[in-house]
Image (spheres, helix red, strand yellow):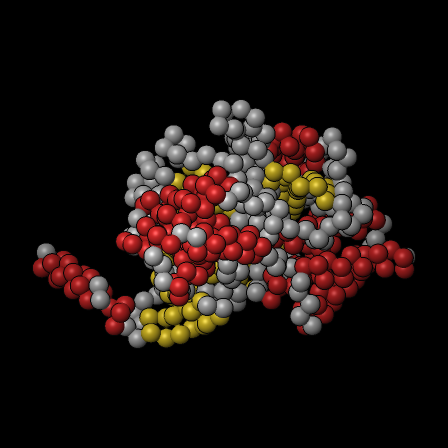
Amino acid sequence: MGYLDSLVDQAKQVKTEDEGAVSEAKKELVEEYEGAKIYRFSGDPVLHYEVHSPHFRGAEKKVIKSLMNIAIGVLPPIRDLTQKEKEKRYFKEIRKIIDETPELNLPENSKDFYAKSVVREMIGYGIIDPLTRDDQLEEIMVNGPNKDVYVYHRKYGSMKTNVVFYEDEDIRDVIDRIARNIGRRIDTQVPILDARLPDGTRVNATLPPISLDGATLTLRKFRQDPMSVVDLVKVGTMDLEVAAFLWLATDGLGVKPANTLISGGTASGKTTTLNVLCSFIPNRERVLSIEDTAELNLPLEHWLRFEVRPPSMEGTGEINMNDLVKNALRMRPDRIIVGEIRGAEGYTMFAAMNTGHSGSLGTVHANSARETLIRLLSPPISVPDIMLTALNLILMQNRIYDRRKGSIRRITELAEIIPTKEGKADLQILYSWDPVKDELIKTGRESVYLSILKHFTGMTDEEINAELSARKAVLEKLVKNNVRKLDDVCFITHKYLVEKKINK
């Protein structure tokens, strides 16, 4: 018992010391860019992200709220303008209101400050507005009042910020403004909001009673510069050999493209990899994408996007994923892309695969290739065993914390579906990730999909291997020359296919 008491005393001592440790700890600047500073504090494993974020209290807050109420009552809604154009227009109008309201007694040198603050509150995101403007941030997480806002940085992972909402009302104001702008409702009767903003940002908000410590807000930001296969190779998500294989499998030499699912956990990078695979689809094909929340960003000419519609406030008008997949099949698609398979849409998609719709792509939540099969067979997806053999490839992706490199995203398995004598689906692994070497290792098993491709094209083993080598060389050159923008990579990979066809 004495030993346990000693440990408890040590824990209390550590806690007491930690309360003032951050302010006294050695502060090391890790990186600075565009108004953001990233610091490392000695003894703290979490990096700190700091921006200029003024907090309004007392008289300042009253003035800003008064100006907002006046502006909302006087100014008409401004539509069909970019965010920057809206900000300029609102700033000009609010500055005019300030000048014409002498009873506010604002000093001349503070009028611009108040005008900017009101604009930020009206059409921005309040005190987290500077965070939303940083394209290096993937996620912004508001966890309630009097708690540090957290962010997830594309380079540094999870970080604590210097931004804090001191009142629950301020978080609710931001949430209400977001909901109104997209015509959605969130209140105590409907305490969850899950939606997409016009700029592609995904928003999730919760209110009490379901969030016990106050309102929460999570923003998953839409990347303005989408990642390409070159980026995935450079950050180590996949290697050139696997990238070349997936390029070949996605276009299928124009004859037999593979049906592929990308599997993994939340925030493992499934949608990013799906976007990269979709960029390999030849431009001549008609592509229909169906998503719960639209996130794909494809440089394809014949691409139609569909997004589910939630029920209205009256509980009517819902259009779900399965409705959209069924409708897509009536639109003469060459490819059907399903953002995330969760339920009945999985059965419909596999029915389409079994009736000749090759090259379907999608994502699913699972922890391994084997578990992916189990999920597909089980409710609520419930794909019959005999239909699973229409699936060719499962690409398993994980987000991993590596003690040497921090948070990394890796393809950990590239598996094939192989039919058994009983007509059921089984798995074989073609590539497996070695965590010690941080490399994808080829298992040496002969690819069933490549055998199918040889059957449909009449190509020999040597010709298929030569094709894979040629594509690997193209990708290697892009990586070496740092040609990474998705539009540029897509143009070159499509040009390769066109020129190859002409040469034949």
Name above or below for residue 396 compared with residue 43: above
Residue furthest to the left in view is: 2
Whether residue 342 is visible, yes or no, is yes
Residue 389, picture quadrant: top right
Q: Quadrant where the N terminus lies? A: bottom left
Q: Would residue 501 be found to the left or right of residue 19 on screen? A: right
Q: Position of residue 165 (x, y in %)?
A: 33, 52
Q: Would residue 277 be found to the left or right of residue 493 on screen? A: left
Front position in the image: 40 or 249: 40
> What residue do we see at 76% from left, 42% from top?
286
Front position in the image: 228 or 263: 228
Front position in the image: 138 or 103: 103
Q: Would residue 55 be found to the left or right of residue 319 on screen? A: left
Whether residue 129 is visible, yes or no, is no
Q: Quadrant where the C terminus lies? A: bottom right
> What residue do we see at 60% from left, 52% from top?
82
> What residue do we see at 71% from left, 61% from top?
489
> What residue do we see at 67% from left, 59% from top?
486
Q: Position of residue 52 (x, y in %)?
A: 40, 64
Name above or below for residue 228 compared with residue 195: below
Q: Position of residue 62 (x, y in %)?
A: 32, 50
